Amino acid sequence: MGKRKFKAESKRLLDLMINSIYSQREVFLRELISNASDAIDKIYYKALTDENLTFNQSDYYIKIVADKEARTLTMIDTGIGMTQEELEKNLGTIAKSGSLHFKNENEVKDGHDIIGQFGVGFYAAFMVADVVTVTSKALGSDEAYKWESKGTDGYSIEPAEKETVGTVITLKLKENTEDEKYDEFLEEYRLKEIIKKYSDFIRYPIKMDVTKSEKNDDDDEYVDYVEEETINSMVPIWKKNKNELTDEDYENFYREKRYGFDKPLKHIHLSVDGTIRYNAILFIPENRPFDYYTQEYQKGLELYSNGVLIMEKCADLLPDHFSFVKGLVDSEDLSLNISREMLQHDRQLKLIAKNINKKIKSQLLSLQKDDRKNYEKFYNSFGRQLKFGVYNEFGANKDVLKDLLLFHSSKEKKLVTLAEYVSRMPEDQKYIYYATGESIDRIDKLPQTELVADKGYEILYFTEEIDEFAIRMLATYEDKEFKSVSSNDLGLESEDEKATEIDEKEHQELFDYMKEQLNGKIKQVRVSKRLKTHPVCLTADGEISIEMEKVINAMPD
Ligand code: ADP
Ligand code: MG
């Protein structure tokens, strides 16, 4: 059979495809492996309805072979194969997806799992290859055919020899140039890495001949030998039954995925079967990543579609206030764009994000309730982020977050929740009192705390700059207003109101003198009702407290 030409438009399209769809070249392997997996899946589906066909799981695999000398990379699969006509149709027409057709034709529904849909992934091979050869023998056919193409100038199809049903795709890798190197795709470690990254949860084994080294017992020399190894884990942990998984399984997964070097404090495993179906595994880390409060830190969850990695850090899945959460989401219901690097609609993503947000909150609350020690560990690492969350976006998330907050308290010098504080307020206490300072010790020594403490009221200690900003955003908790111990009116009952008035007048001259000496640093000197053992204290007048004023003054303009 002679050489056929792509139509002019196809040529341009192919060029576009090869050069501008994907942001990373390595995804060619993901695309070819996904196709191989689809091809095996098709036999599986056929077997469901065809009595003459049995599907013996162990007969099906994908194999990757690199040949450095020949500069070829070969992908072998035992899938359904392609007839001459199918080679022509599926590989000769851009945007023709035999897999999508198969799904529609065979009414493949629920839980399944065929990945292809756009009919473009295959051409990703030309990002790394000069020549692509596809030899295929279709299920139920006696003949095999070879399709070959050098990219934009067309393709040829001719009869070929192949014993078994399935497809072999050989890529003749491009030569290296000054700027572009292709050798990495012949390196064992690199291929393994790419398979692990994108195709770890393909349900059929992806095999490779791997060189190993072993010590010889006789002479202690190392000898190399080659062994076939399955590279992918196949069954994703999130598709396993929760009851069969131990904490250790989750911890191992956390480590394997390199979410952190610590041990996660908690994992959340979700299998949601509602308007949008998805599985998710989320982790609350124990330790703060070293770059957490810097610009460099990127929040996000891994996003999978049918077990194939789509995005490494999907930021839209996590609100900023939970940016510390690690993990992944896998959904069959995502509408991917053509490169599978983005989504066409974010409606599904928004739904998932909303759902996840709720789950994280409820799981944090249950950690707070059932395992306070670990909750405090968590809070020490990430509490500040929650407080920023209350303050940011004009308080839009304050109701989600207020019950997660902890503050040091004058009572027993422990961290307390606002609910705990309010629950033990004496009946005559009107406000939730707080004091700001650099440290707990410093606050303890503040003259302003004396009167409130004397009344037997609890005081929250704010030692972080964000504390007071967050609390001002909250304004109230269970209808109780927050009140700084440094504010003018503490709302405490006082008996010697009159005495003060007289004092003020008597000492006016002294007060005026003090004010003059302090020259603009203070607004007024007054007699205070709140002092017990200290001679003097500062109080703030108006909206902004002394501590907040310090923070604001320290901010860059
Ligand atoms: P998609 O996978 O989105 O359908 P591709 O461009 O990756 O698009 O592949 C086009 C079509 O070629 C597939 O739908 C499938 O019908 C066929 N195909 C590709 N690779 C294989 C393979 N290894 N075995 C059988 N058919 C294949
Ligand atoms: Mg494909």
Image: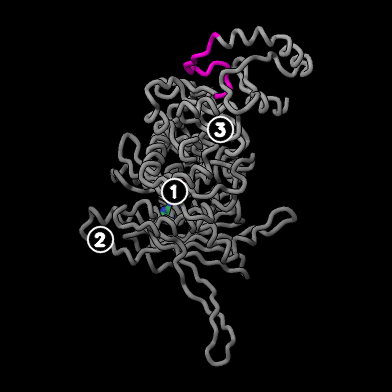
Answer yes or no: disc 1 within 8 Å of ligand 2. no
Label 2 neighbour load within 10 Å: few <14, some 14-19, many 20+: few
Residue 447 at what x, y percent from top left?
Answer: 60, 28
Magenta segment boundaries in residue numbering: 485-498
Say which element carries label 1.
Answer: helix
The residue lying at 36 percent from left, 45 percent from top is: 370
The residue lying at 54 percent from left, 37 percent from top is: 385
The residue closer to the viewer here, 220 or 331, is 220
The residue lying at 42 percent from left, 49 percent from top is: 266
Label 3 neighbour load within 10 Å: few <14, some 14-19, many 20+: many
Mark 2 sits on what residue?
Answer: 53
* Discs 3, 2 touching: Cβ within 8 Å: no
Type of residue at label 2?
A: Leu
Label 1 neighbour load within 10 Å: few <14, some 14-19, many 20+: some
- The answer to if 335 sits in the magenta stretch is no
* Secondary structure that dominates the magenta span: loop
Q: Which mark is residue 374?
A: 1
Type of residue at label 3?
A: Phe
Mark 3 sits on what residue?
Answer: 462
The residue closer to the viewer here, 459 or 170, is 459
Cα gap from disc 1 to disc 3, whole angstroms? 21 Å
The residue closer to the viewer here, 322 or 430, is 430
Q: Earlier in the sequence, mark 3 or mark 2?
A: 2
Residue 101 appears in the figure: no
| Quarter in which the C terminus is drawn | top right
Residue 414 at what x, y percent from top left?
Answer: 47, 41
